[in-house]
Image (cartoon, rainbow, N blue to C red):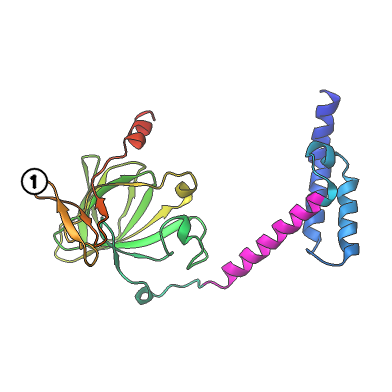
Amino acid sequence: MRPTRRLVMIWIAFALPVLILAGVLWKGPGAASAQQRFVWKVQSAWPVTNLLHVSAVELARMIEEMWTRLKTLNETVAAMPHVIKYNDVPWNQNATTYLKNYTGPAGIPGWLSKVPIHTLDLREQMVFAGRKSGKHRHYQEAFFYIIEGEGYEIHDDKKYPWEAGDVMCVPTYCIHQHFNTGNQNARLFFNLPNVFDLMGLSSIEQIEIHERYQPPEGATVVRNAEGNVIGYKTASGEELRFGSVDLDYMKMMECR
């Protein structure tokens, strides 16, 4: 083993843990003498300044900022509720169904906005008796728990029956739609990982909207030549269409 590589391995094995421990034991901003002692600890782990090209003072500042952010995050999480009351979350509408969103706005915008959950969007949707949801696909995988009702799924043209108590999964980029065959509304609790937002892969390809879709107040429905609803135009003149297919995403997934 070359001397330089051996030195790096020794530093990683011994000096780095000592440096991390020093950062943990250091309680954040304090007296100047406390920071000086910490800088001395960093300087004593000599290879760090050469291997990372960071001065001891600068590294101390970076660890201090990280400590402050972590403390703020912990305080934010500690102040959030751990129990969500069902009636405190309103039913809202999107192109696919009526739903409750227990974690706030979908994706990264809702991150830590209502509950101390970092990586999941938690929702509940309703499929009316004898009706079907909208049809779409997305990169996010999803797990559904059937709270009430009975029906079936169509996933990429294949049928999967379900009933209350079942757990149903939707694989990534699968075209899916829920069908309620019972005489009562079906309630489906589900979660989505919001990490896809960080990768820019959170788009939804809406192929069909649900049967009871209500456009925003003042908007007019847009229909195609066959009379099917394909979108709406807002009072300000903005036209929003459903059923568009993202060709770039399609080509990307065909290369899987």
Task: Give the left or right position of residue 133, taking residue 103 as reference.
Answer: left
Work out which residue is located at the far top of the displayed protein and give it.
1
Q: Secondary structure at mark 1?
A: loop
Question: What residue is shown at x 78% (from left), y 39% (from top)?
Answer: 52
Q: Work out which quarter of the rendered image holds the C terminus and state it.
A: top left
125, 148: nearer the viewer? 125
Q: Which amino acid type is marked by label 1?
A: Glu
Q: Quadrant of the N terminus?
A: top right
The relative height of residue 113 versus residue 204 in the rendered view (above or below) is: below
Residue 78 placement (x, y as % from top left): 59, 70
Answer few, some or many: residues within 10 Å of disc 1's Cα (few below 14, many 20 plus, some between 14 and 19): few
Image location of residue 247, percent across then percent down: 31, 35
Residue 228 in the image: x percent, y percent?
12, 50
Q: Nearer the viewer, residue 246 or 77?
A: 246
Q: Above or below — where is 29 with respect to 138?
A: below
Give the number of callouts: 1
Q: Quadrant of residue 253?
A: top left
Residue sitting at x 75%, y 58%: 64
Residue 11: image quadrant is top right
Up the image or down, 115 lies above or below 205; here it is below
Please give left or right for residue 22 compared with residue 176 in the image: right
**Residue 209, horizontal then vertical, whole percent:** 21, 53
Residue 187 is inside the magenta segment: no
Kindly identify the residue that appears in the image at 72 percent across and 60 percent down. 67
Q: Residue furthest left?
A: 226
Looking at the picture, does residue 86 appear above or below residue 171? below
Q: What range is drawn magenta here? A: 58-80
Magenta-highlighted stretch: main secondary structure?
helix
Residue 183 sits in which quadrant? bottom left
Identify the residue under disc 1: 226
Residue 65 belongs to the span the image colors magenta: yes
